[in-house]
Amino acid sequence: MERSGIVTLTTDFGLADVYVGVLKGVIWSIYPQARIVDLTHQILPQAVLQGAFLLAEACPYFPYGTVHLAVVDPGVGTERAAIALETPHALFVAPDNGLLSCVWENLSAGERAASRLVELSERRYWRSPAVDFQPAPTFHGRDIFAPVAAHLAAGLPLEALGQPRESLVLLEGCRPLRLENGSILGQIVHIDRFGNCRTNIGADWVEELAGQGELKIVCGTCRLTGLVRTYAEGEPGRPLALIGSHGRLEIALREDSAAARLGLRIGDVVRVYRAGP
């Protein structure tokens, strides 16, 4: 795959420490021409599903051959594998803890068949090629993932990084559930800086159900009927539901934070159903 030279970063590191800067320094030390894009470093600590959701949402907007480096790694230093995935469109470097779940779920059957996965076992592409080099057990982002991402961005073939793997860890929360009665059970997977509560329930599922009758949305103590098209269509102080720019259902509050006012959190269950007998 021809590389774009772009490396994106998605982490739960925040910006108060030097961790993000260190990742960039390692990448530029190996591949000075890399163009680094910060997707976000504000994933909640250890919130793997949130990271998986945001990574999958953002990656389609980047050029073919972009390398996406994602580090949300509560199991750093344990037996969990370090992996790289090459899809027909992009390359991904991450811990094998479910962080690539939503990326994988969004691929078609044909794209999955054309994708390749390896374990990052070839130590020469870690931060130091020295035989006695030991990566810090608490910072694989610096010592393994960032160097590998840099080498990939520079054009290294995927197979040079290690042995092929047949599968990767997948989380269940990337997709909602459709219950026997036709209702949909999903969850809040992200809350943006405006307090909009974004769910894993896709527009196609919602629109299919809406075509069968009056739509009801329930999350915690919040009870909503129907959808609006824009935030401005809601009444001030009253929650609303709409399909956001990401193509999924979200709960919002006009000119206010739905999360703060309604006490909603990431992981809260969202039920969508059709009113009637």
Image (cartoon, rainbow, N blue to C red):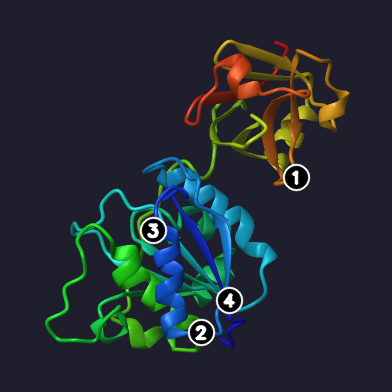
**Mark 4 and 3 residues: CB-CB less than 8 Å, in contact?**
no
Image coordinates for residue 7, horizontal then vertical, percent = 54, 72
Quarter of the image where the N terminus is located: bottom right
* Residue ID for mark 1: 245
Instruction: Give the foreground label among 4 and 2.
Output: 2
Say which of 45 and 214 sits in front: 45
Is residue 117 visible to us here?
A: no
**Mark 4 and 2 residues: CB-CB less than 8 Å, in contact?**
no
User: Sequence order check: which comes first, mark 1 or mark 2?
Assistant: 2
User: Sequence order check: which comes first, mark 2 or mark 3?
Assistant: 3
Instruction: Give the foreground label among 4 and 3.
Output: 3
Q: Could you tell me the amino acid type at mark 3?
A: Tyr
User: Sequence order check: which comes first, mark 1 or mark 4?
Assistant: 4
Q: Disc 1 on helix, strand or loop?
A: loop
User: Sequence order check: which comes first, mark 3 or mark 1?
Assistant: 3
| Few, some or many residues within 10 Å of mark 3 (<14, 14–19, 20+) | some
The structure residue drawn at horizontal position 69% and vertical position 64%, both measured from the top left corner, is: 61
Instruction: Give the foreground label among 1 and 2.
Output: 2
Mark pair 2, 3: CA separation: 19 Å
* Residue ID for mark 4: 88
